[in-house]
Amino acid sequence: MIYFIDEDATAFGAWLLELELRGREVDTIANADAAFQMLCNMPADGERLVVIDVMLAVADPFSTQFPSERTDGSLETGLFLLRDLCEQNTQVFPHAAILLTNTTNDTTRRSAVTMSRNLRVPLWEKSTIYSPVDFADRVDARLAELSAGRPG
């Protein structure tokens, strides 16, 4: 199962369709709160990959566990989602995660790079993914790394 967490997931429909054409199951999650609820107790069995957008929306800014004060004005919501998932579900995270970004904010980029290095999870720039085939090839390669026991 591939979980794609991004409020703009429909904009990446071709990427996700390519995964489905390759026989992958894909589920989209539109915000950090829904993602945390769905993934915090996800079992470690089976092939799983969680693609998390760094600049991610929340369900309700007034009742979220990811308020803008915590997430640098919501610029780093995906990073805090991953951090919380790592604390809650150590059997799955961080190794099943990929961070995805299109940020032009230097502070956000540094935070994402630092987290990627510290947790040994890939950080993919949306602008460097040239096609749906390229995205699906990257997903397949990451899944192969994980199944071979090379998490980082």
Image: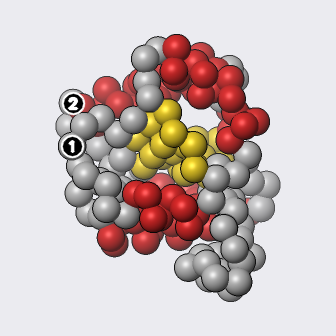
- The answer, for residue 58, to whether it is visible in the render is yes
Question: Of label 2 and label 1, which has the lower sequence position?
Answer: 1
Q: Which mark is residue 45?
A: 1
Q: Secondary structure at mark 1?
A: loop
Left or right of 133 in this view: 121: left
Q: Which mark is residue 106?
A: none
Where, by quadrant of the figure, is residue 107 drawn? Answer: bottom right
| Residue at mark 2 | 148
Residue at 23%, 49% (x, y): give it.
Answer: 44
Q: Nearer the viewer, mark 2 or mark 1?
A: 1
Residue at 33%, 50% (x, y): give it.
Answer: 95
> x, y percentage for residue 36?
47, 64
Quadrant, the C terminus: top left
- Judging depth in this view, the residue of 101 and 23 nearest the camera is 23
Amino acid at dot 1? Asp
Residue at 63%, 26% (x, y): give it.
Answer: 15
> x, y percentage for residue 39?
40, 57
- The answer, for residue 108, to whether it is visible in the render is no
> x, y percentage for residue 93?
33, 57
Q: Residue furthest right?
A: 104
Q: How many marks?
A: 2
Residue at 62%, 59% (x, y): give it.
Answer: 31
Quadrant, the N terminus: top left
Amino acid at dot 2? Ala
- Judging depth in this view, the residue of 130 and 96 nearest the camera is 96
